[in-house]
Image: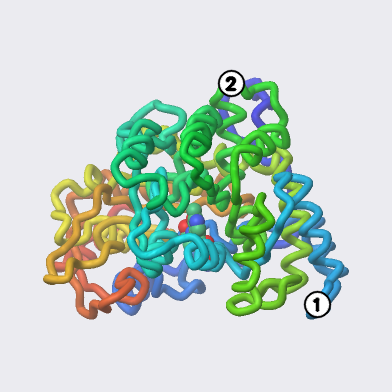
Amino acid sequence: MATVKFAGGDDVPLEMHKVRIVQKLNLPPIEARLEAASAAGNNTFLLRNKDVFMDMLTDSGVNAMSDQQLAAMMVADDSYAGSATYEKLEAKLREIFGLHWILPAHQGRACENILAQVLVTPGSIVPMNYHFTTTKAHIVLNGGAVEEIITDAGLEVTSDRPFKGDMDVAKLEGLVATHGADKIAFVRMEAGTNLIGGQPISLGNLVAVRAVCDRHGLLLVLDASLLADNLWFIKTRDPACRDLSIRDITRRIADLCDVIYFSARKLGCARGGGLCIRDEALYRRMRGLVPLYEGFLTYGGMSVREIEALTVGLDETMDEDMISQGPLFIAYMVDELVKRGVPVITPAGGLGCHIDVMRFLDHVPQSQYPAGALASALYIASGVRGMERGTLSEQRNPDGSEVYANMELLRLAMPRRVFTLSQVKYAIDRIDWLWRNRALVGGLEFVEEPEILRFFYGRLKPIGDWQEKLVAKFRADFGDSL
Ligand code: F0G
């Protein structure tokens, strides 16, 4: 994908696949989009997909699948126990990662439930480069606490550092010194840190973290849900890895880990999850939870068709052309937005493009949920659905006061191989228009605020009539365009 040069000198990410199955999209006129946004309580989670033009809410379970994956689904071995389909998955995971013991699960958070139930005890801590929402919830539910020890550079919104997902190894040593190794349930590294812009970890950092784990007898667990993007970044951003194949890089990473778990809604472009475990005794401790929470050991809550698709998808993840598509499309979007002065997280990461709403809407205070307001405004202006990742996604303190997020982000996920470049150009154009009209966008306030996970179900309304003004400006600028 990266090696095709254009005679005109353009830098265009060229798709190394063709589209053979399509889904018709609907782009309702802006007046209908305003109505849909209001009906959804200005919460993009509550929009109906039929009202959405580009669904950039997430990359989870919505990646395009290959002809080989679909073909494999037709020959699945549907049996409760001892399925031949499961044996293929087990063999593929062993081949790719080299960890012998495998457990299936219905998705990533189910793996986290098993890990936390077995390894986390009340009062224990789990150091990690950065948390993910479901990971943290399971650790806390089991009486543990999360310690985020990302390097300071990881939280710089704009930067040119290639590996902003790296862990601060000195802080890890510090945690061991303060709490003692016995209190540390395990050390967790998240490839392609989700909540801080899909920023990758480096192989060198993982080697250094492993050395600390070896010194103190700690378990190293890798969340590989976003590993595909991270592999591409290691290959292209670390000069020492340029000549390694994706398989070699994967193996070098895996050789450093005691447990690798993943959401197959992201890794492998299917739907499911799994754990790969080095130690048989640990595997045996975890195994009992699979039939309790997931399903029998040879399907783990996944349909056998999805398992077939996952096995092929994991193999295809070892192909540079396949895994580069997401990062290159995201980089294109980020670069084009930077050219237009739109504040975004840099360098471009995996998962999606992240707009820095603290700067985009610097006139909207955090108490009025600027990232939620921008998500709503962008849907109204374009039919593009993004996800708020800011204060709205936090939980209030027990006294009712707000927890203001470190970053106010609008995440625009790039499901792999789903959108064409002209669709991405459309999203860039409408974001640019919104940027030039940002003064029109105001804040939101709750109408209905659930106590837990309010970002999923909460309903909000605009403060003032800014949405009507935005629609009027759109009509003035675009005439009768959709
Ligand atoms: N770990 C990471 C890094 C994730 O991004 C996710 C999910 C999970 C674990 C949980 O996996 O959804 O299969 O249970 N991220 C999705 C997202 C939900 O939209 O970013 P799951």
Q: Which residue is mark 2?
A: 9
Query: Is 313 displayed left or right of 12 in the figure?
Result: right
Position above or below: 385 against 439 = below
Where the N terminus falls, by quadrant?
A: top right
| 2 vs 1, front mark | 1
Picture residue at 62% right of the left edge, 42% below the top: 325
Where the C terminus falls, by quadrant?
A: bottom left
Q: Locate residue 199, reporting x and y percent.
A: 45, 40
Q: Mark 2 or 1 closer to N-term?
A: 2
Query: Is 219 displayed left or right of 439 in the figure?
Result: right
| Ligand 1 closer than 8 Å to label 2 CB | no
Picture residue at 75% right of the left edge, 61% below the top: 309
Badge 2 marks a residue whose secondary structure is loop
Picture residue at 60% right of the left edge, 65% below the top: 286
Q: Locate residue 41, reporting x and y percent.
A: 29, 75
Judge by depth and name the residue closer to the eye, 360 or 481: 360
Position above or below: 94 against 346 = below
Judge by depth and name the residue closer to the eye, 94 or 75: 94
**Image mark for residue 412:** none
Q: Quadrant of residue 250?
A: top right
Callout 1 environment at 10 Å: few (<14), some (14 to 19), or many (20+)?
Answer: few
Which amino acid lies under the numbered mark 1 shown in the image of this protein? Ala
Which amino acid lies under the numbered mark 2 shown in the image of this protein? Gly
Query: Is 275 displayed left or right of 319 in the figure?
Result: left
Q: Locate residue 385, reporting x and y percent.
A: 42, 61
Q: Which residue is mark 1?
A: 81
Q: Locate residue 382, reporting x and y percent.
A: 40, 58
Judge by depth and name the residue closer to the eye, 173 or 467: 173
Q: Is residue 429 visible?
A: no
- What is the image's colouring? rainbow
Q: Quadrant of residue 240?
A: top right
